[in-house]
Amino acid sequence: MDRTGLAEAQAAIERGDFDQARALLEALLVAAPNDVNALNLRTVLALRERDYLRAGDVSAQAFAQHPNHPTLRANRVLSLRRLAGQQGEVGDHDAAAALLIEALGIDPADQESRAMLLGQAMRLAQSIGAPASLQTKVLPEKPPTISVITCSINATRRARFETSLNTHFAGLPVELIVLEDARSLAEAYNRGIARSTGDLLVFCHDDIEFARPDFAARLLDALSSYDVVGVAGCTQLTGPNALWSGPASGYCQIAHVGPTGEWLSSLYGLGPVRVEGVQALDGVFIACHRHVAETLRFDADRFDHFHLYDTDFSWRAFAAGYRVAVAQDLLLIHHSLGDFNETWQEHAARFMTKFPQLPRTPAHPARVLMQPNRRELLLPTLAWLADWQARATALSVSGHR
């Protein structure tokens, strides 16, 4: 390692003498092509010069040697992100998306890459609609019976929910149970279980809508392979909330309606259409086979309000060996952004006391990313994200990445 040459090159970069820095670094790399320090400085120089192709090449060489080094990781992600921005500017959205997905594979919590990827999907949804890969699933010939259990004391929310349910589950043997006198969601859901007759049970909030026409067919398809299915959850539970751990292990396909009525597309973690090995689910929507609900039931004694019943139920399902999954091909619209008030904090403490074996890490700061969108673009936006993820997975499996 030529420390003097490296120091001179770094000084040249800092004073803006890029020609001298380039000459010094190229000479160093001729003598030692795999010197990670020279490669890293060459990456920095290429980024400063906005030569993003070169930055991508040399950052890949350095990162391959030491993938856990924080500086090399950061510069690799930055190089991929800058190159993705360049590709997006010239209209190659597929290439941009592939680069951003690679960056998020290195650092799933990189907010700028997540924002850029979601923005790419939204732009394509607006300009050309959904990708050709978007297909509609059909219902099975003999579908199981379904009991949908919700609590509602708001006539407007209930009417909107029932309209969406009737539209998206039309022709299915669906039983709707609305509980108007819930002392807590856990208590009410237990009564709902006792009243229900369906082979499959759905527990959900009353302030949701189903955003894709084939929602029911996709839900039944997911439940043909798994015992418990949700639209938001995590594969590593490190606190009292299903998305506590951040996008490295958190998955969620929910569009939101903000406080002023704006439609919001969201992006959490990336992953396959069906995420397996899920440890916890968010209670906005949880579906399961009857025997799971009857065996586990909800802990109404400990969770006697409207919080943490969901994390408790799904964590116990996972711990009991049930197959718990997040179905990322489902899409809900949630007319709420959640409320983590003092009552929630109290029940979170109860949950952590009940399960002392769980880690007690702080909530990840980069859990949620939302961007304003139009309602008719919510599904095409999700479809582009799914399409790009499928392509990236196929490339990874085939060994091209």
Image: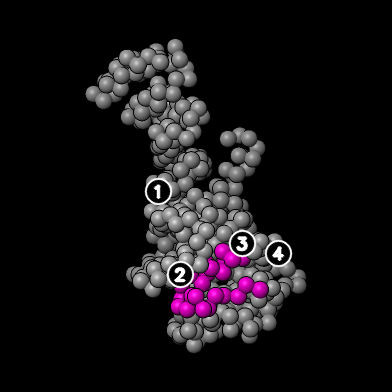
Q: Which residue is mark 1?
A: 111
Give the mark, 4 or 1, whose residue is nearer the N terminus: 1
Q: Using the image, determine if residue 347 lies above or below residue 67.
A: below
Give the crowd class for mark 1: few <14, some 14-19, many >=20 residues within 10 Å: some
Which numbered mark, 4 or 3, is in the foreground of this view?
3
Element class at badge 1: helix
Where residue 37 sits: x, y (%)? 40, 23
Where residue 8 sits: x, y (%)? 29, 17
Residue situated in front as seen by the camera: 56 or 194 = 194
Q: Which residues are magenta?
A: 295-319
Give amino acid for label 3.
Answer: Ala
Q: Which residue is mark 2?
A: 350
Please indicate, yes or no, whether residue 91 appears anywhere in the rendered image: no
Q: Which residue is mark 4?
A: 224
Which numbered mark, 2 or 4, is in the foreground of this view?
2
Residue lying at 39% horizontally and 13% vertically, measured from the top left: 27
Which numbered mark, 3 or 1, is in the foreground of this view?
3
Spatial CA span between label 4 and label 1: 35 Å
Q: Using the image, determine if residue 383 lies above or below residue 257.
A: above
Labels 1 and 2 touching (C-beta < 8 A): no
Residue situated in front as seen by the camera: 140 or 183 = 183
Spatial CA span between label 3 and label 2: 18 Å
Element class at badge 3: helix
Quadrant, the N terminus: top left
Give the mark, 4 or 3, whose residue is nearer the N terminus: 4
Where residue 289 sits: x, y (%)? 67, 71
Give the mark, 3 or 2, whose residue is nearer the N terminus: 3
